[in-house]
Image (cartoon, helix red, strand yellow):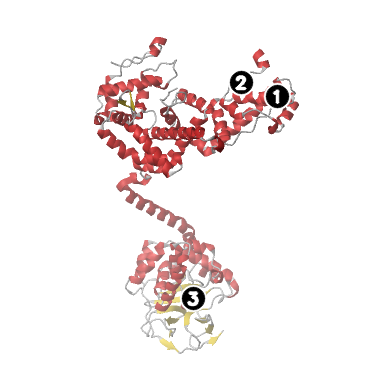
Amino acid sequence: MTTTIQHESHPGAESLAAFAEQALGAHERGQILAHLAICSRCRQIVALASDAAAEAAPTTQVAVRPRRAWWQGWGLALAPTVALAATVAGVAYLHMHRATPDNQTAKVEPPAQIAPNNAPVANTSTTAPTANFARPKPSNAAPAVSSRESIAAPHAQAEGIIARVEEAPAPSVAAPAPLNESRAVANNLVPAPAQTAVDAWQQEQKSAPSAATRVFASKSAAPSKLRDVQTNASGNNALAVNNNALTDVTAGAAAFNNQANSFAAMEVAPTAKRMKKAKELPAILLPSGLPAVSVTNSGSLTLALDATGALYLRPLAGAAWQRIAPQWTGHAVLVRRQAAPGGQENGEDKARSYGITAAAPAKLLEIVNDQNQVWLSTDGKTWSAK
Amino acid sequence: MGVAPAQSVTAAEIASPPAALDRDLAQELWRASGAADWDLSLDSFSRILIELATAANFGLDSLSAANVGQQSAFYRGLHLGELALARGCAAGCERAWERFLSLYRQPLTRAAIAIAGSETVGRDLADQLYGELYGLTERDGERRSPLASYRGRGSLMGWLRTTLAQRHVDQIRRTRREEPLEEIDAAAPEAGPTAQPAELTQLERAIEHAVAAQPAEERFLLAAYYLDGQTLLQVARVLGVSEATVSRKLHRATASIRKLVVKNLERSGLSRRAAEETLGADPRDLSPNLKKLLQNPRTVPFPEQAAS
């Protein structure tokens, strides 16, 4: 046992310090332990020194050798690695969330079977905020949108499509638009006030769980509406937007849920080809000089609303638009064919639930104002309150 | 000239220090230590290494002899840079002192404050040690620095902290002894030896023996935890283990003592049931001094054991 000048019968500071630092061999350690077991003075010394070491540990470590974070060792490889990882994660996410919806839509998507070139072709569905939802309802007043919609829909890619469509010029289109193209067009048709309202709604949703949710909500998941978009290939750029009010407008909650699911499915996985075509789809310019914000058709009849709520009717494809005098109160925000009652799912409903409906003649038409009041018409010219 | 391999050596060879350090190894260690910066030549540094290795017998017990590998591992395990710096300071090298100051002055003061628990006392303690380290004390006309006793087994900072703690504890103990009598609580007069039941006497002896039979580490644990009132964390720091480990060891030690006590009682003639009942005695009726027991493991063996 080592000794010091002062402490003849105690281990020296050297031995005690080495013991506290676990630097001694088994033999020496055993000797020190045996001494510590019987010597309160040395126990006290070791305890005090250990406490002081523990207090000084952080500063000492930093001063002696700053520890490098694990990622610092990656150096320049970090940025590309992170980018690659993000890309892989994004692709995996898209892949996982598009698989089921694609399968579902693939059953009914071929437009040739449903819509010949000279007939209203595709009834594509999407969700878009409308003016009467400018102030978004709280979540308990939101439509009975399935959780799948809220989960599957957040989609940066959809955001990208929409942004590009909004920037794109409006060339004419002769071909039927695929589903997601129509959805993109529908978003393009959102009027400025409504879009402003949507922006406000986005602002309110900033406390939402994720940015992805906000993206989805702003572009496709309006608080309580879904919109069916029909592309009429018989006209140059005839688009029929068939809106389905959800909760308090229609009674068919079950049918809506089916639709919501399929719409949510369509929200995801737009292919690059569709994205490219979506850019080419034009907006409908009405005689007011404003683009149509809501369009529907019934046979050869096409109805369109502009941002001011003015209703225009076109009896035949290619004919001139006629303005219909307002016979309703408030600000018309939506024109559509009447939704199927009672949530019964006949063949057409099922087809529409997949986002595609061949336009059927002589349907009851509806106008919805910003108070969610509904007016009905069979010819588009004469309207009566529902 | 290499270190003599000493796989099987005689007692004389064990007692004698290694004649010399392998030249290549010595040069490697000398370079690694940076001793040249503090005016320590290769020879003087080699002498220091040999001296401290001999004193510690390369970390082995006094009856074992270190082979070449053990010797080399011992040398390489030293804090060579700090050892060279300390020896340079002790030799009066100004550059070494400057380096020492820049590296250790502030940590030394902080450690002293932490140990003393008071900034004033801590600074005094640090200044006092610093003066000592600088070699203000003279012995036989020579300045002596405690740094000359640093052997590089642990870190220099650890050595400084422990030295500070030593000074502080000794100072407190000395002060206590020097306190005037009136400030010390007068000890109550010890009651004369009272006759106590034979069971209790047996129990006391059984406890004494059980405690004494514990290994050193367990006794250290018991003493640090129960006598000194250290926390599990403090004990864990000293032993370099986790608090949970200390807790487990303590539990195991107390269970072992209890088991041994029962066993010892049974050996002294009590039935198991009677032994268990004896364990339920009020501790206040017992007079064994645990402090004395833990710190003085010499106990009288049980007659039965002595006989066997």
Toward the viewer: B92 or A370? B92
Instruction: Tell me the amino acid under the disc marked 2.
Output: Thr
Left or right for B217, reference A20: right
Task: Tell me which numbered mark, 2 or 1, is placed earlier along the sequence.
Answer: 1
Q: How many marks?
A: 3
Same chain assignment for discs 3 and 2 = no
Tag 1 and tag 3, C-beta contact below 8 Å:
no
Classify 10 Å Cα crowding around label 2: few (below 14), some (14-19), many (20 and above).
Answer: some
Quadrant in the rendering for residue B266: top right
Q: Residue at x 74, y 29 (%)?
A: B277
Q: Secondary structure at mark 2?
A: loop
Toward the viewer: A213 or A189? A213
Quadrant in the rendering for residue A310: bottom left
Mark yes or no: residue A109 visible: no
Same chain assignment for discs 1 and 3 = no
Query: How far is disc 1 from disc 3 in space, using C-alphas?
Result: 91 Å
Residue A160's x, y, as percent? 37, 65
Residue assigned mark 3: A133
Q: Secondary structure at mark 1?
A: helix
Q: Which mark is residue B201?
A: 1
Residue A253 to residue B293: above or below: below
Tag 2 and tag 1, C-beta contact below 8 Å:
no
Residue assigned mark 2: B299
Q: Secondary structure at mark 3?
A: helix
Classify 10 Å Cα crowding around label 3: few (below 14), some (14-19), many (20 and above).
Answer: many
Tag 3 and tag 2, C-beta contact below 8 Å:
no
Residue A73's x, y, as percent? 33, 44
